[in-house]
Every structure is written in C-alpha cells, then in structure tokens.
Amino acid sequence: MEPAATEEEVEARFRWNTEAAVTAMRWHGLANVNRRERLVLTAFLLFFGALMVAASIANHSYELVVICVPCAVLAWAGIRLEPWLKQRQLKVGPDQEVDVAWTLSTAKVCVSFAQSNSRSSGVHEWSAFERVVCTPEGMLFYQDRLSFQWLPRSAFQPGDFVRALKLARAHARQCSVVAGASTDCPACGHDLRTIAPGGPCPECGATRR
C-alpha cells in the first residue's frame, strides 16, 4: 500500500500597517484598470490634443496658454500629491495594526488575524476567491471584483512565493500576473533589472525576454 501524498503547504506572515495598506491599494488600482477605462483616457487625451492643435491653427495662442497652463499645473500637483493623499486616507494607527498569518495548501486557504488581545481566523476553499492577481510586490485575493485580501511578497520565506503562485495557478478559479515594469518577470513579477536578457528569473526560472 502506497503512503498518502503529503499535502503541500506554504506559510506567510506579515504586519498590516499603513505601508501595507498603501501598497495593496496601489496594486489593486493597477490590477483593475480595464480596457474601457483605458479607451476613455485615450479618447480624452486625443480630444485635448486636438483642441490644442485647433487653437494653435486659429492663432488663439493666449487662450491656449490660459487653458493648458492651469491643466498642466493641476496634473502635476495631482501626481505629486497622490501618494501623500493616499497615505493619509489609508493611515493605520499603531492600535489598528494587525499581525496576519496565511497558510496556503492544495485544499484550502487559511487566514488568521491577531490584534492586541483578540484573534480571529477564516478557512476558505480556493473556489471562494473569484481571482488571484500576482504583482511584483505581492498577491491580491479577490472575493469579488473589488473586495480583496493582500498578501505581500515580503511575507514569504525565500522560494515560497513561487510555491504559493503555483498553488494559485493550480487551484484558483482565475490567476493572472500584473507586471509593474517591462523588466518584471512576466511569470511571477520578480524584478529582473539585474538579470541579462535571456537569463533565468531567480525566483521562478522563467527566461527574461
């Protein structure tokens, strides 16, 4: 009689604080920029560009400056202030920080939370998650389109992140990778800037393009 196969498990632990909240929301935003939103943004930019060209051709240079300069200032201010505003909005006080522990296996996903003297935990089947999104800094587990739980890459021991990603690909209803830059590994999101083209990813072994 053959021995029963050992169920693979991957454990991860981290502290939920302001930094984790800001990082999670940033990747949540990047993971949910859909095609329609991209088309709307592209159409707006094309319209604005056409407006500038038309004003230039009609020799309305003063009006063009009056329109463009405030818009450019507002855009620059928005880009510069966005991280600060997001951090203030998502600020987690010391009394609100939570120690989070994950255990991922072939059968289930367990998440436990410890805060001061209180503890809670939940056990989920992989099918409870609509999708799992892997990013260069962690994984997003979505219960629906907008509700998610964050599991940072730094919570794993060396090599365990790829094991968790393999479990998600094998058992989650949907699993995808969002790369933050062209130098990120397309398979696991690892930063490959120090790896020469054609070299293997040190995390998952995929070849850098």
Image (cartoon, rainbow, N blue to C red):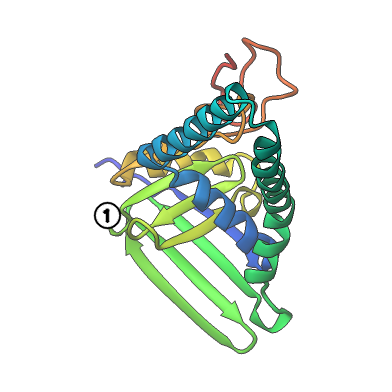
Q: Residues within 10 Å of mark 1 (few under 14, many from 20)?
A: some
Estimate the x, y position of residue 38 in percent, counting from the top left: 43, 37
- Rendered-image quadrant of the N terminus: top left
Above/below status of 143 relative to 161: below
Estimate the x, y position of residue 120 in percent, counting from the top left: 48, 80
Which kind of residue does numbered mark 1 sit on? Answer: Ser
- Farthest residue, direction left: 1
Q: Nearer the viewer, residue 194 or 22?
A: 22
Q: Nearer the viewer, residue 89 or 38?
A: 38
Give the side of residue 183 with respect to residue 110, left or right: right
Q: Secondary structure at mark 1?
A: helix
Q: Would you name the residue on which mark 1 appears?
A: 127
Tell me where residue 98 sits by quadrant.
Answer: bottom right
- Rendered-image quadrant of the C terminus: top right
Estimate the x, y position of residue 79 in percent, counting from the top left: 69, 48
Give the side of residue 110 with respect to residue 1, left or right: right
- Farthest residue, direction front: 59
Above/below status of 49 relative to 12: above
Q: Nearer the viewer, residue 185 or 41?
A: 41
Identified at 58% across, 78% down, the residue is 114
Answer yes or no: is residue 164 visible. no
Identified at 47% across, 66% down, the residue is 111
Above/below status of 80 relative to 94: above
- Farthest residue, direction bottom: 117
Estimate the x, y position of residue 35 in percent, counting from the top left: 37, 36
Identified at 57% across, 44% down, the residue is 160
Identified at 57% across, 48% down, the residue is 138
Answer yes or no: is residue 110 visible. yes
